[in-house]
Image: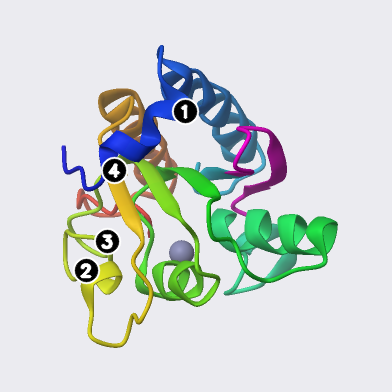
């Protein structure tokens, strides 16, 4: 687990981060049933209310931008009519990729909370850390490992099943 600035996450005490992550796991499972990689995200406002949901829709929309984080961000921005997310929190089941981590920095997201790390493509600490890049003139708090084992298990199960169906070689590809 990696945590920076967790003291300001006190508004989410008493296990509420875990509760949100469990909701995301259920939404990610629904995405998996549609043939998508199971990843789901939600944006919470400073009061802890959900204002944007997203799940992976790359296959359904044939859209390389169809990642859960970008869907949640777009919905929340439409609702608020504002692209700035200082003081907001984005939760996602998998550590964001470089595209999504870059978008979150650009959106000035206050905090990002993720479930499991992505050792192959994670861009908030695993492969690179865009939250601490000199290009990020915005400080974004990052907290990983919330329900991490459950999130990892969900992804691994999905990839195992897909390999079995397609006869693909046994390689671990979280967040493919
Ligand atoms: Zn992404």
Q: Residue furthest top?
A: 14
Please identify the quarter of the rendering in which residue 63 is found: bottom right
Residue 79, horizontal then vertical, whole percent: 83, 56
Residue 105, horizontal then vertical, whole percent: 44, 72
Residue at 28% of width from left, 30% of height from top? 148
Q: Is residue 75 magenta?
A: no
Q: Is residue 55 magenta?
A: yes
Element at label 1? helix
Do callouts 3 and 1 mark residues in contact (Cβ within 8 Å)? no
Direction from residue 53 to residue 15 in the image, left or right: left
The residue under label 3 is 124
Residue at 55% of width from left, 36% of height from top? 28
Element at label 4? strand
The residue under label 2 is 129
Q: For residue 11, which numbered disc appears in the image?
A: 1
Please identify the quarter of the rendering in which residue 78 is found: bottom right
Say above or below: 77 vs 64: above
For label 2, count other residues whose C-alpha is less than 10 Å away and answer few (under 14), some (14-19) or many (20+): some
Residue 91, horizontal then vertical, whole percent: 48, 42
Do callouts 3 and 2 mark residues in contact (Cβ within 8 Å)? yes
For label 3, count other residues whose C-alpha is less than 10 Å away and answer few (under 14), some (14-19) or many (20+): many
Please tell me which of labels 1 and 2 falls first in the chain.
1
Element at label 2? loop
For the residues labelled 3 and 2, the Cα–Cα distance comes to 4 Å
Q: Residue furthest bottom?
A: 135
Do callouts 1 and 4 mark residues in contact (Cβ within 8 Å)? no
Q: Camera-side residue: 147 or 131?
A: 131
The residue under label 4 is 143
Mark 2 C-beta to ligand 1 under 8 Å: no
Direction from residue 113 to residue 142 in the image, left or right: left
Residue at 50% of width from left, 69% of height from top? 108
């Amino acid at each position: 687990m990696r945590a920076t600035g967790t003291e300001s996450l006190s508004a989410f005490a008493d296990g509420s981060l875990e509760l949100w992550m469990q909701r995301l796991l259920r939404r990610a499972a629904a995405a998996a049933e549609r043939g998508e990689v199971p990843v789901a995200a939600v944006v919470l406002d400073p009061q802890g209310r959900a204002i944007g949901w997203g799940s992976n829709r790359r296959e359904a929309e044939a859209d390389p931008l169809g990642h859960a984080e970008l869907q949640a961000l777009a919905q929340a921005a439409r609702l608020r009519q504002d692209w700035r997310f200082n003081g907001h929190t984005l939760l996602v089941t998998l550590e964001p990729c470089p595209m999504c981590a870059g978008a979150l920095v650009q959106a000035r997201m206050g905090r990002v909370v993720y479930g499991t790390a992505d050792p192959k493509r994670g861009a908030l600490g695993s492969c690179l850390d865009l939250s601490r890049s000199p290009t990020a003139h915005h400080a974004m708090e990052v907290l990983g490992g919330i329900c991490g084992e459950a999130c990892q298990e969900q992804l691994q199960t999905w990839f195992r099943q897909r390999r079995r169906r397609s006869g693909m070689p046994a390689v671990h590809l979280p967040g493919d």
